[in-house]
Image: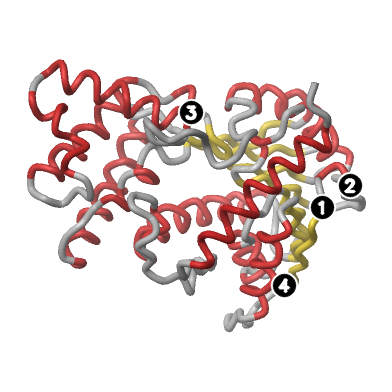
Amino acid sequence: METDQQYLKEEAEAFDERISQRIKVGFIPDLRRAVKCDHFYKSFWREPHFIQLYLGWILDGLLDLLATHCGKGLSILDVGCGAGYMSLEFARNGYHVKAIDISEECIKTAQQTFAENPFKEGFGSLEYRVMPFEAVTGSYDVVMFCVAMHHMRNVQAVVDKAYSMLPKGGHLLCYEPCHERFGRGDAAQVALIRGLMSIVGFWYDPGELKDALRDENGLSTYVDDVRTEYVLERDKNEPGGQSPHDLEVNGEEILMALRSRFKEIEVRPGCSFIYRLIGGLRGPEKVVHQLASFIASYEHFMVGEGHLNPNMFYFLGRK
């Protein structure tokens, strides 16, 4: 049976390699200073406009939950911060953030990005540390997990520890995947948009849709492939996800653990599919940006109306 040390080592090495590759090709993990990066072929990280449509929208939701239910200027522990771009934004919004991750390269990158931060007005405070969540001590007003908890094997123990680090009235805030909700109908929406974009020459790989555009059998197979892509967070022929222990738990398991210890204050649906779609658009920049903005608006509308299943969710709970 794999030990906790082996598990942490494997995860850290995967994220060390991932961020190192990205930095070499010019990636800047800063929502306000990001640059176009062709390394990403269909990810939202490809262009600053796409980043704002996806991560900017997520950030706005997190900040709104904090402002509505928690308050300003609070102390936040950001668990599994990765390259630190969300932590940086919370500090820019006046919060006092301690951000941790097990990847030394991610933290080194985050520290360098923070050192170059030109947006200092209203800044709270920010500290990045390399350490596992189990080693953290102290008390915080908010413990936050932004697409981090699903990497953790014993989610109940994680929630229990977060609970112990909060004062009465403190909050746990998270944004996590619930890919098990993403159904065939949702995948068909992705297939439709990609197919239309492919026909008019605006999809990065028209050959990907060749069989889907041929007949209904080809379309059916492609829809199944898309659903698998989103549920597993990787392409059909990709050997693995972003790390060896990605998707250790699903959304329902996370919610069950959260509700066992915290009073649920608000649960909101997150995004559905744009994070693996808008970055694949190609064409004149003005048109591509208009298309991406419309697709993002369409997604939010359809999720809000209940016609699309969310692939992520927000949770805010109070101790």
Q: Secondary structure at mark 3?
A: helix
| Three-letter code for the amino acid on which mark 4 is drawn | Gly
Q: Measured along the vertical axis of the image, is residue 188 above or below residue 316?
A: above
- Relative to 27, 205 lies left or right: left
Give the colouring mode of the picture. Answer: secondary structure
| Three-letter code for the amino acid on which mark 3 is drawn | His
Q: Secondary structure at mark 4?
A: loop
| Residues under numbered marks 2 and 4 in contact, where contact means CB atoms less than 8 Å apart | no
What residue appears at the point 37 percent right and 21 percent down from the top-left corner? 183
Label 1 and label 4: CA atoms lie apart by: 22 Å
| Residues under numbered marks 1 and 3 in contact, where contact means CB atoms less than 8 Å apart | no
Find residue 317 and report its horizontal and vertical position in percent: 70, 37
User: Which image quarter holds the C terminus?
Assistant: top right
Q: Residues within 10 Å of mark 2 (few under 14, many from 20)?
A: few
User: Which image quarter holds the N terminus?
Assistant: top right
What residue appears at the point 82 percent right and 33 percent down from the top-left corner? 4
Q: Earlier in the sequence, mark 3 or mark 4?
A: 4
| Residues under numbered marks 2 and 1 in contact, where contact means CB atoms less than 8 Å apart | yes
Q: Secondary structure at mark 2?
A: helix
**Residue receiving disc 4:** 124
Label 3 and label 2: CA atoms lie apart by: 29 Å
Q: Secondary structure at mark 1?
A: loop
Find residue 267 and report its horizontal and vertical position in percent: 57, 35
Q: Which mark is residue 131?
A: 1
Q: Can you tell which quarter of the image residue 40 is in? A: bottom left
What residue appears at the point 52 percent right and 29 percent down from the top-left corner? 178
- Relative to 108, 250 lies left or right: left
**Residue receiving disc 3:** 179
**Residue receiving disc 2:** 135
In the foreground, 287 or 282 = 282
| Three-letter code for the amino acid on which mark 1 is drawn | Met
